[in-house]
Amino acid sequence: MAKNILIADDNSIVREVLRECLRATSEFETTEAADGREAIEKAKATRPDLIILDLAMPVLNGAQAARILKQLLPEVPIVMFTMFKVGSDWAKDIGVDAVVSKPDGIAQLTRCVENFLAPH
């Protein structure tokens, strides 16, 4: 059964590229959100296996959304995919399990996602 990944980024091109790359590399289904509030609503509705959040989003930013999502779905890994430098201690404090820098690329993000969703 395909794993469901929620992609939350206010840039539709980033969401599209992530969706296509994740689908090309593995059997992933994706759900998309354009802001933090929509990410929370879609996470409640779809119960994703993993959440990818951008930090800088309107309505609720990625940090605000991560705190709420971790309370709602504590077992679901959250990956922050961002242009900003984010410390690992800060990320853990808000419920983020991993941080991938957008300049490091989608290949690194894909490896991170596969590591979280690989059968143990």
Image: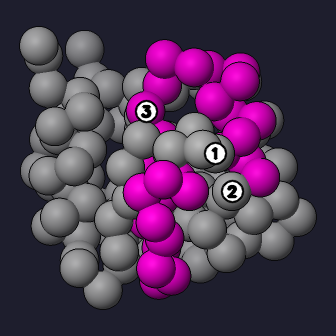
- Circle 2 packing at 10 Å, graded few (<14), some (14-19), many (20+), is many
Asked which quadrant contains residue 68, the reply is top right
The answer to whether residue 119 is seen in the rendering is yes
Q: Picture coordinates of residue 7 (x, y %)?
A: 51, 52
**What kind of element bears circle 1?**
loop
Q: Quadrant of the C terminus?
A: top left
Q: Is residue 6 above or below residue 19?
A: above
The residue lying at 23 percent from left, 77 percent from top is: 105
**What kind of element bears circle 2?**
helix
The residue lying at 35 percent from left, 74 percent from top is: 101
Query: Which amino acid, by three-letter code, is at mark 3?
Result: Pro
Q: Picture coordinates of residue 45 (x, y %)?
A: 70, 23
* Res 28 label: none
- Start and end of the magenta stretch? 64-91
Measure how far apart labels 2 and 3 are at the Cα level: 14 Å
Measure how far apart labels 2 and 1 are at the Cα level: 6 Å
The residue under label 1 is 94
The residue under label 3 is 77
- Residue 67 horizontal side relative to residue 91, left or right: right
Query: Which amino acid, by three-letter code, is at mark 1?
Result: Ile
Do residues under tags 3 and 1 come within 8 Å of each other at their CB atoms? no
The residue under label 2 is 63
**Label whose residue precedes the other's in the sequence (2 or 3):** 2
Do residues under tags 2 and 1 come within 8 Å of each other at their CB atoms? yes
- Residue 79 horizontal side relative to residue 6, left or right: left
- Residue 116 horizontal side relative to residue 91, left or right: left
Query: Which amino acid, by three-letter code, is at mark 2?
Result: Ala
Do residues under tags 2 and 3 come within 8 Å of each other at their CB atoms? no
> Viewer-nearest of labels 2 and 1?
1
